[in-house]
């Protein structure tokens, strides 16, 4: 999946959604090897989660609307 600047995302860690980490994409580095290698800069809502750098890969976050849609009801 291709993500764009401005997309609202939530962190995924070991297959679990981390709802305390919600942010938006501020930059996308498109890798010539393909979209699975793209790196994303994400500005997280909680300043403590902003580590800087351009290192978030596609498998490390989801679009917030996809996460909500796939979230099991409790």
Image (spheres, rainbow, N blue to C red):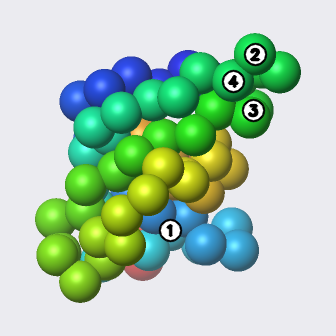
Q: Circle 1: is it few (<14), some (14-19), or many (20+) Cα within 10 Å?
A: some
Q: Nearer the viewer, mark 3 or mark 1?
A: 3
Q: Quadrant of residue 55?
A: bottom right
| Cβ–Cβ under 8 Å for marks 4 and 2 | yes
Residue 36 or residue 11, whichever sits in front: 36
Whether residue 24 is visible to the viewer of this picture, yes or no, is yes
Looking at marks 1 and 2 on the same chain, the residue that comes earlier in the sequence is marked by 1
Find disc 3 in the rendering and name its residue: 36
Identify which residue is drawn at 45% across, 29% down: 28
Q: Quadrant of residue 52?
A: bottom left
Residue 17 lies, in percent from the top left, at 50, 68
Identify which residue is drawn at 55% across, 64% down: 12
Q: CA distance from mark 2 to mark 3?
A: 10 Å
Find disc 1 in the rendering and name its residue: 17
Q: Image quadrant for the C terminus?
A: bottom left
Residue 48 lies, in percent from the top left, at 23, 83
Looking at marks 4 and 3 on the same chain, the residue that comes earlier in the sequence is marked by 4
Q: Nearer the viewer, mark 4 or mark 1?
A: 4
Q: Circle 4: is it few (<14), some (14-19), or many (20+) Cα within 10 Å?
A: few
Say if 66 sits above or below 29 in the image: below
Disc 3 is placed on an element classified as: helix
Residue 32: which disc?
A: 2
Q: Nearer the viewer, mark 1 or mark 2?
A: 2
Q: Nearer the viewer, mark 2 or mark 3?
A: 2
Q: CA distance from mark 4 to mark 3?
A: 8 Å
Whether residue 9 is visible to the viewer of this picture, yes or no, is no
Disc 2 is placed on an element classified as: loop
Disc 1 is placed on an element classified as: strand
Residue 51 relative to residue 46: left or right: right
């Amino acid at each position: 999946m291709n993500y764009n600047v401005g997309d609202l995302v939530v962190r995924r860690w070991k297959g679990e959604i981390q709802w305390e980490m919600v942010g938006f994409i501020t930059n996308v580095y498109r890798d010539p090897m393909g979209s699975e290698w793209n790196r994303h800069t994400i500005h997280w809502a909680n300043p403590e989660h902003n580590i800087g750098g351009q290192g978030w890969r596609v498998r490390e976050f989801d679009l917030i609307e996809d996460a909500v849609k796939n979230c099991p009801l409790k």
